[in-house]
């Protein structure tokens, strides 16, 4: 029997269930719903898991969030996506922020932000919601892009499947800080510290068929800066206590 959850609000803390309980390094768990939003809004790709024909399948895909609903999209011919309708699924989003280099192999770690969502996925059939969901997916990747584009045609919408997943059951886990070595290892002659990791954007490369006179729009030229301001990751080695 599927569990039933009340619809969360932006102020609702994350509720702990048997599936979301963080058992190892529980001090890294976060219960503030705003931190769930932060992890999701900072991402571009999620990993979506579902059981199809008795076997687990994991798909990397783009996504978007509107309030307390996560939207996934793909081809309407995608059997895995269609198989998820009405089924229990799981979605994970992870950011790798730093390599944590300790003095012992066992003490090595990574700094990260991660979110895992569980729930029953629903195939979206309402045209207005489907369009809003596709907008959220587009804006998740490139903020400001949707308004510059030709909107999807009926044929294109028919070729696209959209899944909705409520954010009622989710866990967030974050590690940030230096290595946590055993006291006996601190005098070892081995370098220790954090190597920060960050996603960067290169210079835009115009399409060969681009008409003359069309310059790089502001939402593309400023992509790196806007995403950094909107989704900036914490410093990978900011000196916070290791957890």
Image (spheres, rainbow, N blue to C red):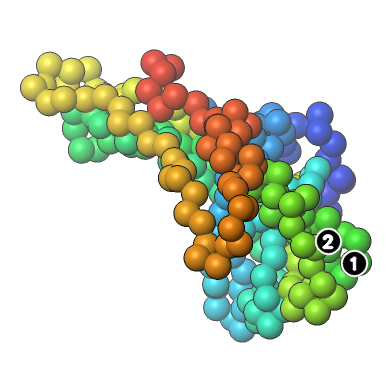
Q: Name the side, left or right, on which 241 lies relative to 79.
A: left
* Looking at the image, residue 174 lies above or below residue 79: above
- Circle 1 Cα neighbour tier, 10 Å, few/some/many (<14 / 14–19 / ≥20): few
Residue positioned 72% across, 33% down in the render: 33
Residue position for label 2: 131
> Depth check: 86 or 135 in front?
135
- Circle 2 Cα neighbour tier, 10 Å, few/some/many (<14 / 14–19 / ≥20): some
Q: Is residue 2 visible?
A: no
Element under label 1?
Answer: helix
Looking at the image, do the residues carrying marks 1 and 2 touch, with CB atoms under 8 Å apart? yes
The picture places residue 125, in percent across and down from the top left corner, at 87, 70
* Looking at the image, residue 36 lies above or below residue 205: above
- Say the numbered circle drawn on residue 14: none
Element under label 2?
Answer: helix
Q: Is residue 195 visible?
A: yes
Q: CA distance from mark 1 to mark 2?
A: 6 Å
Q: Residue furthest front?
A: 212
**Quadrant occupied by the N terminus:** bottom right
Residue positioned 12% across, 26% down in the render: 190
Residue position for label 1: 127
* Looking at the image, residue 144 lies above or below residue 238: below
Residue positioned 61% across, 73% down in the render: 51
Residue positioned 43% across, 45% down in the render: 202
Quarter of image, res 182: top left
> Depth check: 57 or 28 in front?
57
* Looking at the image, residue 72 lies above or below residue 161: above
The picture places residue 94, in percent across and down from the top left corner, at 51, 46
> Depth check: 193 or 13 in front?
193
Quarter of image, res 151: bottom right
Q: Name the side, left or right, on which 177 lies relative to 21.
A: left
């Amino acid at each position: 029997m599927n569990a039933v959850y009340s619809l969360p609000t932006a102020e609702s803390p994350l509720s702990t269930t048997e599936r979301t309980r963080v058992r190892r390094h529980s001090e890294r768990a976060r219960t503030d719903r705003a931190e769930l939003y932060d992890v999701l809004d900072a991402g571009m790709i999620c990993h979506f898991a579902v059981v199809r024909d008795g076997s687990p399948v994991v798909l990397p895909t783009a996504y978007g969030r509107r309030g307390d609903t996560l939207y996934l999209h793909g081809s309407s011919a995608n059997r895995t996506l269609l198989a998820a309708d009405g089924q229990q699924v799981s979605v994970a989003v992870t950011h790798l922020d730093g390599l944590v280099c300790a003095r012992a192999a066992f003490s090595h770690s990574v700094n990260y932000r991660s979110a895992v969502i569980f729930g029953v996925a629903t195939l979206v059939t309402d045209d207005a919601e489907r369009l809003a969901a596709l907008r959220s997916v587009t804006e998740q990747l490139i903020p400001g892009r949707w308004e510059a584009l030709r909107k999807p045609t009926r044929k294109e919408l028919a070729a696209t499947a959209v899944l909705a997943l409520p954010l009622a059951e989710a866990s967030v886990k974050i590690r940030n800080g230096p290595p946590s070595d055993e006291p006996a290892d601190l005098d070892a002659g081995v370098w220790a510290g954090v190597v920060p990791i960050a996603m960067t954007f290169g210079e835009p490369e115009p399409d060969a068929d681009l008409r003359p006179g069309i310059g790089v729009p502001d939402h593309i030229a400023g992509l790196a800066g806007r995403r950094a301001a909107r989704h900036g990751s914490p410093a990978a080695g900011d000196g916070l206590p290791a957890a």
